[in-house]
Image (cartoon, rainbow, N blue to C red):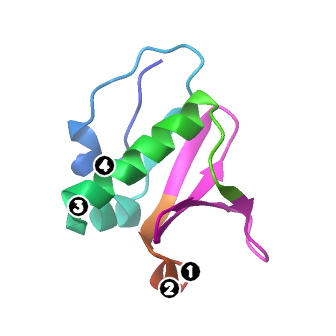
């Protein structure tokens, strides 16, 4: 399966993965822009954690209260995702304090 990205930003530079068991990863514009602004090390850690989740590996994930999304913890950063079965939509990513604010 090929990882599909909804925007041509930072996510377009990631190599395609042909693992048939892997979920598709898509990024909303806000998430893509947030990743572009991050330092390369932080961005790489977040993308590695997303790939691990898409492969079915265990990650630090919790259901958010009052919202239909999940959050993945990556150090001091949080990634808000919507797991749609075979597609993981990345809603937003950023520092723990600001990523939850709408």
Q: Which mark is residue 44?
A: 4
Mark 1 or mark 4, whichever is nearer to me: 4
Q: Residue 98 at what x, y percent from top left?
A: 46, 84
Residue at image location 58% in from the left, 56% down from the top: 81
| Badge 3 or badge 4: first in the primary sequence | 3
Q: Look at the numbered disc 1 and give the secondary structure of its residue.
A: loop
Is 32 a magenta residue?
no
Q: Where is mark 2, residue-wise?
A: 97
Viewed as shown, does residue 17 lie left or right of 51? left
Mark 3: few/some/many CA within 10 Å (<14, 14-19, 20+): some
Q: Are marks 3 and 4 in contact (CB under 8 Å)?
A: no
Tally of marks: 4
The answer to which of 29 and 64 lies nearer the viewer is 64
Residue at image location 55% in from the left, 13% down from the top: 20
Residue at image location 64% in from the left, 54% down from the top: 60
Q: Where is mark 3, residue-wise?
A: 36
Q: Is residue 50 above or below residue 32?
A: above
Q: CA distance from mark 1 to mark 4?
A: 21 Å
| Badge 1 or badge 4: first in the primary sequence | 4
Q: Are marks 3 and 2 in contact (CB under 8 Å)?
A: no
Q: CA distance from mark 3 to mark 4?
A: 11 Å
Q: Are marks 1 and 3 in contact (CB under 8 Å)?
A: no
| Badge 1 or badge 3: first in the primary sequence | 3
Mark 4: few/some/many CA within 10 Å (<14, 14-19, 20+): few
Q: Is residue 50 above or below residue 41?
A: above
Q: Look at the numbered disc 3 and give the secondary structure of its residue.
A: helix
Q: Where is mark 1, residue-wise?
A: 100
């Amino acid at each position: 399966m090929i990882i599909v990205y909804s925007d041509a930003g930072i996510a377009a530079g990631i190599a395609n993965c042909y693992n048939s068991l892997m979920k598709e990863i898509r990024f909303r514009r806000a998430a893509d822009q947030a990743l572009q602004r991050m330092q390369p090390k932080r961005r790489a850690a977040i993308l590695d954690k997303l790939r691990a989740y898409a492969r079915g590996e265990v990650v630090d994930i919790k259901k958010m209260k009052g919202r239909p999304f999940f959050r993945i913890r990556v150090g001091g950063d949080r990634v808000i995702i919507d797991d749609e079965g075979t597609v993981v939509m990345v809603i937003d990513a950023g520092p723990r304090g600001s990523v939850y604010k709408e």
